[in-house]
Image: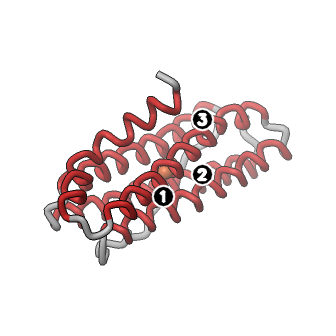
Amino acid sequence: MLKEKMHAALNHQIKIEAESSQIYLGMASWAETKGLNGIADFLYGHADEERMHMLKLVRYINERGGHAFIPLLEGPKNEYSSVNEVFESFLNHEIEVSSQIDELVGLALSERDYSTHNFLQWYVAEQIEEESLARTILDKLALIGEDKGGFYMFDRDLVNIKSSLSNENTGI
Ligand code: FEO
């Protein structure tokens, strides 16, 4: 059974993950309207991943005898000035999410809730991967600079970046 503090904190994380999904959906839609189809596909996929992060929390809270509340969400940003701004926002957002996950891990330890601590390790690993993904993308954009051909290739290849990074991380 989840203790009250942990229950409230995990419910709050549902909102953060759901809002992340909305934020990436807003970015994806912006990119699609600019004809950046590779970037849009990547971001649509990422919005789905965030929904899955949210759903894992919903299922976990209910499995532990709690009640996962489905929150009202803030509307996301819908306009961006550049692809750089999109991915800088992406990185900053993931850094914030990582610190939220760290708070949850700290709470799980102080509450001696080792099941939740164990459950959260998946999120800890995921955050390392997501921050690293965002930094890799920003590095690539910095290298491309004003090179239109390079940017065209970047847009085309972005969908493959995550899977190749995941393979690197898992050593497959
Ligand atoms: Fe679910 Fe990107 O943090």
The residue pinned by badge 1 equals: 71
Q: Which residue is mark 3?
A: 122
- The disc, 1 or 2, on the residue closer to the chain's N-terminal end is 2
Q: Residues within 10 Å of mark 1 (few under 14, many from 20)?
A: few
Residue 151, position as x, y percentages in the image: 24, 59
- Residue at disc 2, secondary structure: helix
Question: Is residue 2 at all visible to an observer of this figure?
Answer: yes
Reading the image, the residue beneath label 2 is 11
Q: Of helix, strand and loop, which one carries label 3?
A: helix
Front label number (2 vs 3): 3
Instruction: Out of 99 and 66, give the one closest to the viewer.
Output: 99
Q: Is mark 2 within 8 Å of ligand 1?
A: no
Query: In the image, 118: left or right of 142?
Result: right
Is residue 98 found left or right of 86 in the rendered image? Answer: right
Q: Which mark sits nearer the N-terminus, 2 or 3? A: 2
- Residue 95, given in percent of the width and then of the height, sits at 58, 59
Helix, strand or loop under label 1: loop
* Residue positioned 43% across, 69% down in the render: 74
Vertical side of 169 occupied by 12: above or below: below
Position of residue 60 relative to residue 29, above or below, is above
